[in-house]
Amino acid sequence: MPSDPRPADDDALLQTLCELSALLDPVLLKPAITRALCQLAGARRCLLVRHEAGLDLIEAEARRDGLEVCNSQRYCIAGPDDLQAALTLILSHRGQSHGALLLFYDDAPGQAMTRCARHIAAHAAVLLSNAADHARALLEKEMLLCAERELRTSQELLKQGERFNHAGSMRYLVREDLMFCSDELCRIYGLPPGRNCITYDEFAALMHPDDRQEVIDTVNAAVAMGGTIRLEHRICRQDTGEVRTLSGIGKPVWVDGTFTEYMGTATDITVRRQAEYAIRAAQVDMERVARANTAGQLTASIAHEINQPLMSIVSNAGASLRWLDRSAPELEHARASLRDIISEGQRAAGIISGLQNLTRKHATQFERIDLHALIRHILTLSRSELEQRDVHLVLSLSPAEVHVLGDTVQLQQVLLNLVVNAIDAMTGVPENARTLSISTTCCNEQRVKVTIQDSGAGIAPEAMPRIFDAFYTTKENGMGMGLAICRSIIETHRGRLRVTAASPQGSAFGFDLPRVP
């Protein structure tokens, strides 16, 4: 027969309570409490249960014989018989329940055992409350550390993104008149390391002198109404004085119906702008080369046009000498011949001037242009070429005067290029079938359409979609730039260049332009 269990003495109880106090992990503390009650309070079996969702769940269990411990959140007490314990102790601390201890005895426990059990239970309630607080604190700490790591990672990604994109961020506190800049924006501005806060006056001092007033006016106007700030301006870096071009945007932050600050970004677009300028310069040079190439194809025609006034000049000069060499000089006839010489000289000079304009590099200048006069001038340059190739010209211009706003040289280049292409397209056509048609049609009071049609072999259907692409050509020795440049010029003049198949054969290139009074 086993001896009757007796309660532990005060020293053993104090020692156990100290050992339980050292346990902060609830997973370890709960089974330790049940074991202590079996050992010190003499219980045959001890259960730590909690109530959840209408069920009594066993969190820890210990038996005096061997002190086997069950610690499972899923173990549910089967029925009311399992709750008929000899002693039930509720674990409550600061008004919060942490479960109940169910103690089972072979015989009714004595007062000493009951008192020992209640001491342990009272201490266990405090320990379970502290362990729960400690577990929550550890969880909150871990969550805080995770949030801190995520924030640090996010900040580093933001810094890397700003460095890669050459874009900095800023906060502008309107009332305090302070601007806080990110590290990348400080680098863009050339601010000293650690100087990430500047005043608005210091920000204005960074602006390029030519852009400063415009920037100040734009910012002041946006601040006055709480609107979005959008700027593209130049700065002079504070450290080196280097000029950089920035594109910035700032959005107001509203609090209680009023805005207190601006959040925004500034992107360094210097390299982009330099590339755009270089591309534009290269395009201008390419246009000039294309004009020279087109004009070169009309060398014979242009020479013929210049020879005509030169031969007339020589003839009139000889006639003038003969009129003056007579015994009675015919002064009136001599004067008429000299006037013809002046007229023919001016005509030759005009032809040379037009040729020089086509091949000379010049800035785009828009002006009011007589479109029909421009077409006739191009036909004058190419008349001999038309005659030598036996091309029949059909000119159908609108009876009304038509003026457009554009660059004379650029529109000459388009017309000359389309005429030369049309003449080349009819090389393989029988001589009696070569026809070049040029017509103008007033679509309405706002626009006019120019059509240049040939009777050549036409453009293959598969080549139609690419005919205006740069470096694409159907000619054996073509550059592939003429039509691409023509399209760019027409689009700059707010028009559109198109191509269609002509009937019964050939191609028709047409473009429209806006009319001006």
Image (cartoon, rainbow, N blue to C red):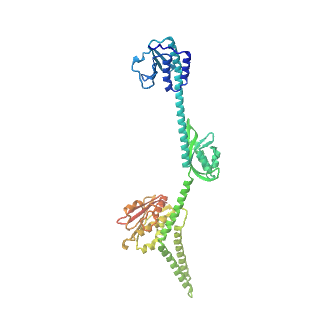
Residue at screen point 40% across, 59% down: 465
Please, is residue 288 above or below residue 301 in the view? Answer: above
Query: Residue 426 placed where, x, y %?
Result: 39, 70
Query: Residue 476 placed where, x, y %?
Result: 42, 68
Q: How many marks?
A: 0
Query: Residue 217 placed where, x, y %?
Result: 60, 47
* Viewer can see residue 366: no
Residue at screen point 54% across, 65% down: 361
Residue at screen point 64% across, 48% down: 205
* Viewer can see residue 65: yes
Farthest residue, direction left: 504
Quick one: 368 or 493, which is closer to the camera? 493
Quick one: 503 or 337, which is closer to the camera? 503
Question: Is residue 286 left or right of 429 when viewed as pictured?
Answer: right
* Rendering quarter of residue 2: top left
Farthest residue, direction front: 1
Quick one: 13 or 301, which is closer to the camera? 13
Please, is residue 361 above or below residue 318 in the view? Answer: above
Query: Residue 24 placed where, x, y %?
Result: 53, 26
* Rendering quarter of residue 424: bottom left
Farthest residue, direction bottom: 327
Quadrant of the drawing holding the N terminus: top left
